[in-house]
Image (cartoon, grey):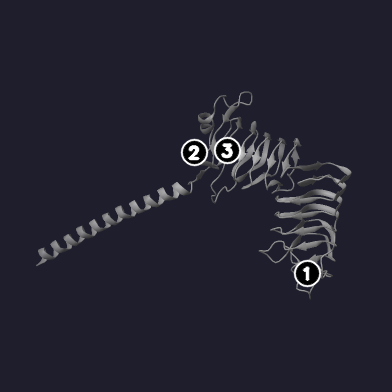
Amino acid sequence: MNSKTSSNQGDSKKGLSLSLRFLVIFLTIVLGVIVVVVMRFYPFYIYQNGCVTYCEGEICTDEDLASLSASGSGSDEDPYIIVNRTFVQVQIKSDCISSSFIMRNCLITYHWNEYYWNGFTIGDTDQYISIENNTFESGFLGIANCKNVNISNNTFLEDSTGLTVGDYCINVNITGNHFVNGGIIFSPLNDIYFDFAGEFANNFANGKPIGFFRNMHNLVINESYSQIFVLFSMNITILNQTISNTFVGIDLYRCSNVTIRFCQISNSAYGVTASYVFYFLIEKNEFIDNYWEQVNIWDSNCTVYNNNFIKNNPSDYNQAEACYCQTSIWDYNYWSDWDGVNPYPIGDCTADQTFDNYPLENPLELF
């Protein structure tokens, strides 16, 4: 009786062991299929010490640059030259890539992923890098904390957001680039270190020049531009601009005594953005059918009145935002989504809410 019981128990254990083995094999096969499918349709990225250690046909390491280059040794005097290639994603960081290179006549597209979603980034580098005569089909090119970078004569197509310039870009040249329904964004993450020192010239969006003004004084800007950037300047007047289909229309950083009048901005992300701008007047302008806040002001003092805000930021409640502003006066503006009774609330990321206390019932006739 005991021997039969022991035999049955042994058979049960063998059966259980076989079942577990089959289960493990089955799960391994299923997991393998899932990984293959994910890697086929969504490139799989593994990060180690800030570097991409696996990419699907991308530039991630010095070895990638060497294998893809047509010539060169990777030094500043003799950079690698990469021509006529197609890339989905490029990540250039000093702890991953230390070689100098030129990328020319290439096509850059991208796959969105949770770590880097812009497709092409250059950051924390001081080697010579030149991105020239390329086509950006989608995503955007982002640069920050870099030196000795040249971005010239590239085309950013309609599905591309454009070029984002972050903190601490020294000896960076941005020249001769063309943007279709996109543009340039200056996007400081750390205001203490933000600056742009280099050449900025002959860049166009939607066939019109992009205006860039740094360290200017007593200037009236009334030539026609597709975007306007003003940095470290004072006594600036911006007049008579018609801007559409870009990311930001007018962007101001660390300026004083700025006036914006008779401008119309439409079908863009932001109309006017400003950080650390003092004695700032926005008067008699029109913002139409833009998809985020049309006046976005941070840590400035401003007066905003007699403007039309029409069908902007449809996914949110406010058509404008003022954050951490010492003085912020918003009165006598027309807001297409005003309830007709109460003061119109201006978006504010602090506890102190700002209002247009005298919103207009009908739009102003400005143009």
Q: Nearer the viewer, mark 3 or mark 2?
A: 3
Q: Residue at x 11, y 66 (%)?
A: 2
Which kind of residue does numbered mark 1 sit on?
Tyr
Q: Which residue is mark 2?
A: 57
Q: Is residue 212 above or below residue 284?
A: above
From the viewer's perspective, tell me whether residue 367 is left or right of residue 128. right
Specify whether residue 59 is in view: no
x, y percent for residue 66: 53, 29
Q: Which residue is mark 1?
A: 344
Q: Nearer the viewer, mark 3 or mark 1?
A: 3
Quadrant where the image shows the C terminus: bottom right
x, y percent for residue 107: 57, 38
Residue extending farthest left: 1
> What SS does tag 2 mark?
loop
- The span from disc 3 to disc 2 (Cα, nearest Å) is 13 Å
Residue 107: give its label. Answer: 3
Specify whether residue 103 is in view: yes
Image quadrant assignment for residue 264: bottom right
Quadrant where the image shows the N terminus: bottom left
Q: Is residue 298 above or below residue 142?
A: below
In front here: 54 or 162? 162
x, y percent for residue 150: 68, 33
Q: Residue at x 85, y 42 (%)?
A: 216
